Each structure stands twice: as C-alpha cells, then as structure tokens.
Image (cartoon, rainbow, N blue to C red):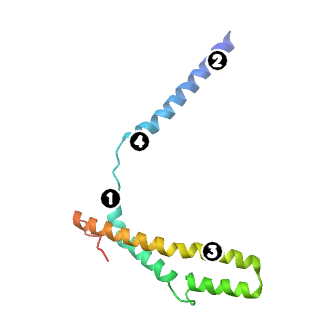
Amino acid sequence: MPMNRKAAAIGALALAGSVLAGAAPAQAAETPKGDGAKAICKRVPATQARLDKALKRLNGDATVVGSVARLEKRVAEAKSAGHTEVYTYLNDRLDFRKTLVPTLELRQKDLKAVADWCGKQGSSSAGSK
C-alpha cells in the first residue's frame, strides 16, 4: 500500500508542477509591456547609420569588399576558370546579396517614417535623414 501512496504523491506533484508551469507564461502574456516605441526612437540614428553603411557597401564598385559588383566579378572569374562548384556557391551568394538591396532600401524608407513619427512625439534623438 505505501507504494501506491508514493505513486499518487508523485503524480500529484507532477500535475501541480505542470499546472503552475502553464500558468506562468499566461500571466506574463497578460502583462502589457508596450510596443517599445521609446527604445526604437532612441535607436533610430544608429539604425539609420547601419543601413546607410550597408547600402553603401552593397552598391559599391568591384573594389569594395562585400559589394554586389565585387561578387559578380568573382562569379564571372569562377565561371571562366571552370570551377563549377565555386561558381554555384558564389552565384547563390550573389542572388541573396542582390535581394538585400531592395530589402534594406525598404527598411530605410520605413525607418524614415518611424523617425518622422518619433519627431512628432517629441523624441529628440530621432532626427530624420
């Protein structure tokens, strides 16, 4: 009989633990923490600088490390050398890098709208470019 009591006690503890574990995230989700607008407004200038730097690098000429033009040159060289595997690898990277430009330009546009909004809210650190 003592084994049944131990098993029942362990089962009850396990059940209580699972109920408590499930309740904690539910309570945390109910607590409003805001949308982080103040923090976003504070980071706008640094974010703009990072986006500008990344776009400048991607749009650079073939001498700029990380530019689309430089990677295009490397892809062409791999193809002309007959390095099929290297060509495939670099070409896939080039395809991805080309998609980064419009994505970052869209983020830059969206961030400008955020900077304007922050300026209207009275945040002094969110100057727009």
Q: CA distance from mark 3 to mark 1?
A: 34 Å
Q: Nearer the viewer, mark 2 or mark 4?
A: 4
Q: CA distance from mark 4 to mark 3?
A: 39 Å
Q: Nearer the viewer, mark 3 or mark 2?
A: 3
In the rendered image, residue 60, in percent from the top left (x then y), is placed at 51, 86
Counting residues from the start of the chain, the first of labels 3 and 1 encountered is 1
Q: CA distance from mark 2 to mark 4?
A: 35 Å
The reply to whether residue 65 is visible in this rendering is no
- Residue 37's disc is 1
Counting residues from the start of the chain, the first of labels 4 and 3 encountered is 4
Counting residues from the start of the chain, the first of labels 2 and 4 encountered is 2
Q: Is residue 125 left or right of residue 76?
A: left
Q: Which residue is mark 2?
A: 6
Q: CA distance from mark 1 to mark 2?
A: 53 Å
Give yes or no for contact between labels 3 and 1 (Cβ–Cβ under 8 Å). Answer: no
Give the position of the C terminus as an image quadrant: bottom left
